Image (cartoon, grey):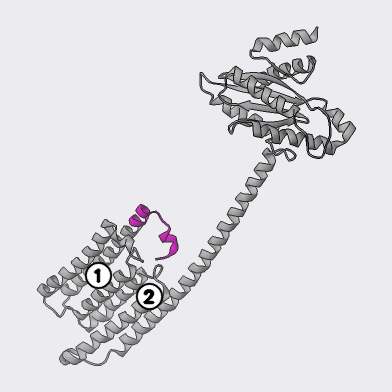
Amino acid sequence: MNTSTMRLEPQALQRLLLHRFAMALGTYALALLLLTLAMATGHVRVPPTTLLLGGIPLVLSQLVFFLLLRSGRNLRFQDPGMIEAQVLVALFWQTVLLGCLDDEARSTLMAFYVPILLFGLFQLRPRAFVRCAVLAFVGFVALEWWDAFFLPQAYAEPPFLQLATLFVLLFWLCLFGRYINAMRQRMRQRRHALVAHQNTLRGMMRQLEDQASTDELTGLCNRRHFLRLAERELLRLPAHAQYGLALIDLDHFKRINDRYGHAAGDRVLQTFATLAQACLREGDVLARYGGEEFVLLLPNVNLDQISVCCERLREAFAAAEPLGLSLGGLSLSIGMTRLQRGDNLDLALQRADQALYRAKHNGRNRCEASWEPSDAHTDRRSASS
């Protein structure tokens, strides 16, 4: 059986094989219908009782195939569809049927070799198909030889035209089967090439998605990706849960760029990103919000845990020493707030920004919080005054 069929799930494969078996039974039914017509027109040599008794092994052979398919034991075979076996059994009964007919009916029903072989045309390998075709021809020759030897009174002359016709027909089917098999192999190769191209495109798409969602310098997710992720998390936030949200700004970063150059500033940003990822939990999300500003989302935390986490980040960065640089003391300021179900992300970011402004205003290198919306309004009034 071809590899595409073998890759089907067992249940789907069994349904397909049972449908094919039903088609084979339909072919047997048509042959029996033609046999009945031959009996009605007097073209059958043997008595009807003999035909009925001969039909019992036919029914039993098909019952064996059916039980193997229904029980699933066919899946243990190299060919789960038992295609070659079914074709060989059908060729045997076709030859037996022709042996029951006179020369005129035999010449007509000889064409039934074709649908039997077509049943295996798309499933059998070329060698197996040729083997079945050769056995069909040998069986028909043996049938004619039997009539010539044992029934000389009913044997007029050697049926050279029938034999030649059958040989040409079977030879053409073998050539056509080889062509079909070669075309199927080409289609399989093209399908494999297409799958490889699709996998390559998926990989490129993932790279593009990563580039679109990742900050190139720090390796953190960028602002757009963070906002999309935070909005999604906020929508599915449980009623009694809360998230921590923090805006982080590296203190005096412009001074570092002006005094030591932008390469040094990039090194500081990378140092903070590496250090922060080491301090955070697996589910925490840190993103570069813009320039020297970062944003942090802490799932399932209380207020104390938010404060502890941010203080840990601040202290770790204050003790950091970027590789190859001597910058003196580094520091950062953090504005903290919380997210609850029903909160607006933009308003929460405004609260964190107001807390960050307060941290900067109070001397930097510190963490400030605006837990409630009223805190943000208070900060705005104090800033305007």
Q: Quadrant of the C terminus?
A: top right
Q: Is residue 374 visible?
A: yes
**In the drawing, what numbered circle is on residue 128?**
2
The vertical placement of 12 against 306, above or below, is: below
On whether residue 12 falls in the magenta region, the answer is: yes
Mark 1 belongs to which amino acid? Answer: Ala
**Residue at the spot 28% in from the left edge and 75% down from the top edge:** 91
The residue that mark 1 highlights is: 31
Q: What range of the chain is rendered magenta?
A: 1-15
Name the element at disc 2.
helix
> Which is more toward the observer, 134 or 243?
243
Q: Which of the two marks, 2 or 1, is nearer to us in this view?
A: 2
> Which is more toward the observer, 237 or 293?
293
Inter-mark Cα distance, 2 to 1: 24 Å
Mark 2 belongs to which amino acid? Answer: Ala
**In the drawing, what numbered circle is on residue 108?**
none
The vertical placement of 108 against 221, above or below, is: below
Q: Position of residue 71 (x, y in %)?
A: 26, 57
**Residue at the spot 75% in from the left edge and 17% down from the top edge:** 359
**Residue at the spot 64% in from the left edge and 14% down from the top edge:** 371
Density class for disc 2 (Cα within 10 Å; few <14, some 14-19, many ≥20) is some
Q: Is residue 344 visible?
A: no
Q: Quadrant of the N terminus?
A: bottom left
Q: Position of residue 302 (x, y in %)?
A: 57, 19
Snapshot quadrant of residue 332:
top right
Snapshot quadrant of residue 369:
top right
On whether residue 221 falls in the magenta region, the answer is: no
> Which is more toward the observer, 327 or 202?
327
Q: Position of residue 121 (x, y in %)?
A: 39, 70
Density class for disc 1 (Cα within 10 Å; few <14, some 14-19, many ≥20) is some
Snapshot quadrant of residue 338:
top right
